Structure formats: C-alpha cells, structure tokens
Image: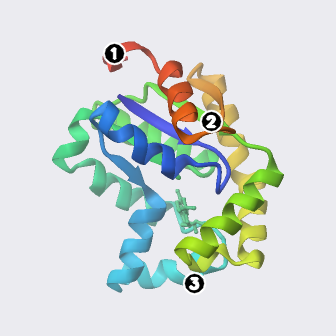
Amino acid sequence: MRLVLLGAPGSGKGTQAELLKAELGVPHISTGDLLRAAVKAGTPLGLRAKAVMEAGQLVSDEIVLGMLEERLAQPDAAAGFILDGYPRNVAQCEALEGLLARIGQPLEVAIKLDVPTELIVDRIAGRAAKEGRKDDTPETVRERLRVYTEQTEPVAGHFAAIGKLTNVDGVGELAEVSRRILAALPRSGAPA
Ligand code: AMP
C-alpha cells in the first residue's frame, strides 16, 4: 500500500499511521520525525532545520525531498509506505509525483483526516503536556495552523483533481478512526 495521510497538525495522522503500519505491513514515514531525528543528532541538515521548525514554518522543499528520497530507498519501503507530513505544499506534491515515478512506486491514495479546529487546538495542548515538543507552544501552534491553512490545505485539492483523495472523519475513538481509514483504502494494495 502506498498511502499519503493528510490533515491539520494534531489531526491524528501520526497516531493513525503508527496503528496502521502493522496492519498494512509498510513503514510509517513522517518527515517531521525524520527532521526531529536530524535536529537531535545535530547533523548539518538538522542545524539548518531547527530554527525554522521552532518558528512553526516549513523547512525548505529541497531539504525535505532529499531526506524523503533517502528514506524511500531503504529496503522496508519497497513494500510501500504511509507518508505523514508530506506533501506540505503544492510544489511538494509535484516533487512527490516525480520521485515516486522515478522509483516506480506510484501513489495509490491520499486520505485526509477531517477534524474541526476547536478539537485540533485541544489535541495539540494535550500532546504538548505529554510529549513536550518544542513546536507545541501556543505561539508556534498558531503559526503552524496558519501555514497549514495557507500552504497545505491546497494539497488536498491537488489529490482530488487527480482522483486520489478520500476524506475520512477523524473524530472518535482511535480504533474507530483506524477502521474508517482501512475501509477507505483501495482493496488489497495491488499496484495501481
Ligand atoms: P510534523 O511533525 O509533521 O508536525 O512536522 C513538524 C515540523 O517539521 C513542521 O512544522 C515543519 O517545520 C517541519 N516539516 C515536517 N514535514 C515537512 C515538510 N514536508 N516540508 C517542510 N517542513 C516540514
């Protein structure tokens, strides 16, 4: 299965990807996690990305694409992937299409998790208390939501235009949302 999960920050993409990866037998690839690992390891790329992430803005398309390309070249991604946090703008949609065509792994479906904004704000506050992410402060969260509305929302329109978008209600018990996502997937994960 080659799947992109879309949705606002705090919509549950990462949590759902973790729940679904075993079920689907494919890795969960989160560009946010890859970037946080690079920041933690203090790599040159991580050093460049750190301030941008803490400001709630988007790291350069070029950096993220390079990182994603490297990750998709790992053997476990040969079976497919659940992509979380990418693409984040329309340019990244086009870059993803090009990359997946090059590696002969075309996308099957993009699932967008729909969660109302009031709930998003509550969920991020809950996560901030639990995980202590540096970009979950109220000010940065506001900026991330602004960037989402301005740059990432059009991504859903891009996938809708190519007939690959399915919307899923992201409100409810975790297991119930997982079931909705599984029900929305193309059958058997056969190549598109
Ligand atoms: P996330 O864990 O997906 O919420 O991402 C955390 C932060 O990492 C974002 O606010 C961005 O600064 C950065 N980031 C993650 N994915 C991308 C991406 N595809 N393009 C640019 N920046 C990204």
Q: Which amino acid does label 2 sit on?
A: Lys
Disc 2 is placed on an element classified as: strand
Which is more foreground, mark 1 or mark 3?
1
Observer able to see residue 48: yes
Is 51 displayed left or right of 161 in the figure? left
Is 144 displayed left or right of 182 in the figure? right
Which is more foreground, mark 3 or mark 2?
2
In the image, 149 versus 26, the foreground residue is: 26
Q: Which residue is drawn at 77% across and 52% down?
A: 119
Q: Is residue 152 above or below residue 36?
A: above
Residue lying furthest right: 118
Mark sitting earlier along the chain (1/3): 3
In the image, 26 versus 174, the foreground residue is: 174
Q: Residue at x 77, y 78 (%)?
A: 139
- The percent position of residue 57, horizontal first and vertical second, equals 65, 70
Q: Pointer 1: what residue?
A: 188
Give residue 17's quadrant in the image: top left
Residue 178: numbered disc: none
Disc 2 from disc 1: Cα separation: 20 Å
**Quick check: marks 1 and 3 in contact, CB under 8 Å?**
no
**Quick check: marks 3 and 2 in contact, CB under 8 Å?**
no
Q: Which residue is drawn at 16% across and 46% down?
A: 75
Observer able to see residue 43: no
Q: Pointer 2: what residue?
A: 112
Q: What residue type is labelled 1?
A: Ser
How many residues crowd mark 1 within 10 Å: few (<14), some (14–19), many (20+)? few
- The percent position of residue 59, horizontal first and vertical second, equals 55, 68
Q: Pointer 3: what residue?
A: 51
